[in-house]
Amino acid sequence: MPASVTFSQQQLVSDPEIYEKDHFRKVCDKAEFDDNYVTRLDINNDGLIDAVVNEGALTCDGKHGPDCDADGCPYNFYVQVKEGGYLMIATAKIYGYDFIQRFGNKVFVLKMPPHFCDRTDGPQCEMTVRVRGVMFVTIFKK
């Protein structure tokens, strides 16, 4: 994976939306969250509903997307586990993503700056990844 994606093993959280919002309510004097702050969907095809948090949909002390820059905004990917709770499996600074059906499985097409595809300019990099269990697996990038 490119440098913009960080893998992490963390403790289980009961609900990523509550966990993340509580964090930003402590960091910001005033935290506001757009409707698309959390998206709930099954990202690893196991039948359990997972969550993707878009920090670009946060307004902290009047600044929209405070951690966004030319490389995009932070997104946190959480997988729900059978034992109960959610595990954050990756953080990626991206422009956005599409979640599509490809070859019988749902996959992410992560949209990033061209340098993540070893280009200095041109169209944005699109990296297609599948989540298997609690791991991101790169299928291809263009």
Image: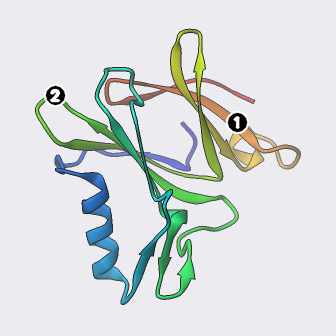
Q: Which residue is more in the foreground, 33 or 27?
A: 33
Dot 2: few (<14), some (14–19), or many (≥20) neighbours within 10 Å?
few
Label 1, label 2: how far apart the Cα atoms are:
31 Å
Quadrant holding the N terminus: top right
Q: Mark 1 sits on what residue? A: 126
Image height of 121 relative to 118, above or below: below
Residue at the right extreme of this rendering: 122
Q: Residues within 10 Å of mark 1 (few under 14, many from 20)?
A: many
Q: In the image, 96: left or right of 107?
A: right
- Is residue 33 found left or right of 140 in the rendered image? left
Residue pictured at 11% horizontal, 32% vertical: 83
Label 2 sits on what residue type?
Lys
Q: Nearer the viewer, residue 113 or 33?
A: 33
Residue under the image location 23 percent in, 43 percent down? 86
Q: Are marks 1 and 2 in contact (CB under 8 Å)?
A: no
Residue 137 located left or right of residue 16: right
Residue at 23%, 51% in the rendered image: 15
Which residue is drawn at the image coordinates 25% and 61% (left, top)?
19
Left or right of 17, for residue 129:
right
Q: Position of residue 45 (x, y in %)?
A: 39, 21
Regarding mark 1 in the picture, which secondary structure is present there?
strand
Q: Which mark is residue 82?
A: 2
* Res. 136 image quadrant: top left
